[in-house]
C-alpha cells in the first residue's frame, strides 16, 4: 500500500516531457487536480480538494505512460 500524502503530491520522474496527467478514483472516474509546479525533476500536484482514499495517477509522456497509486490522507 502506498504511503498516505497530504495536500500536495510530489512526483519525481525522468521519463521525458509530460503530455498529460490524469487522476482517477478507484472506480475509474477522473477527478480534478491542479498542477502547482513543474521543473526538470518532477511536478507538484495540489490534491487538497480530494476526499481521503486511494487514487490512480496516470502520467503520459511522449511515447509511453506511467501509472501508480497514491493514498490521500
Image (cartoon, rainbow, N blue to C red):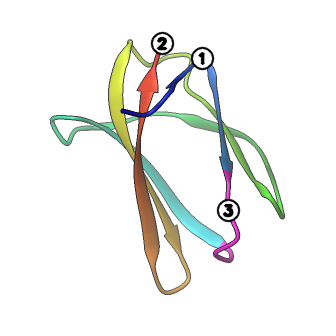
Circles 3 and 2 in contact, beta carbons < 8 Å: no
Q: Judge the density around disc 3: few (<14), some (14-19), many (≥20) Cα neighbours within 10 Å.
A: some
- What percent of the width, then of the height, locates residue 5? 56, 23
Taking the magenta stretch, the answer to whether it contains residue 34 is no
First in residue order: circle 2 vs circle 1 = 1
Q: In the structure shown, which secondary structural element does the residue marked by tag 1 occupy?
A: loop
* Depth order, front residue of 16/37: 16
Report the label total. Answer: 3
Start-end of magenta stretch: 12-17
The tag on residue 73 is 2
Picture quarter containing residue 47? top right
Circles 2 and 1 in contact, beta carbons < 8 Å: yes
* Depth order, front residue of 59/12: 12
The tag on residue 19 is none
Q: Is residue 13 above or below residue 3?
A: below
Report which residue position mark 1 lands on.
6
Circles 1 and 3 in contact, beta carbons < 8 Å: no
Taking the magenta stretch, the answer to whether it contains residue 13 is yes
Q: Residue at (49%, 87%) from the top-left corner?
A: 63
* Depth order, front residue of 26/36: 26
Q: Residue at (44%, 71%) from the top-left corner?
A: 65
Q: CA distance from mark 2 to mark 1?
A: 6 Å
Q: Residue at (44%, 19%) from the top-left corner?
A: 50
Could you tell me what secondary structure mostly forms the magenta stretch? loop
Q: Is residue 54 left or right of residue 13?
A: left
Q: CA distance from mark 3 to mark 2?
A: 23 Å
Q: In the structure shown, which secondary structural element does the residue marked by tag 3 occupy?
A: loop
**Residue sticking out furthest to the front:** 1
Q: Residue at (45%, 65%) from the top-left corner?
A: 66
Report which residue position mark 3 lands on.
13
Amino acid at each position: 500500500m502506498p504511503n498516505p500524502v497530504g495536500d500536495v503530491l510530489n512526483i519525481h520522474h525522468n521519463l521525458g516531457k509530460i503530455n498529460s496527467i490524469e487522476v482517477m478514483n478507484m472506480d475509474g472516474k477522473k477527478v480534478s487536480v491542479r498542477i502547482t509546479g513543474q521543473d526538470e525533476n518532477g511536478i507538484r500536484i495540489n490534491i487538497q480538494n480530494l476526499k481521503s482514499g486511494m487514487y490512480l495517477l496516470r502520467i503520459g509522456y511522449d511515447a509511453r505512460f506511467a501509472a501508480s497509486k497514491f493514498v490521500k490522507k
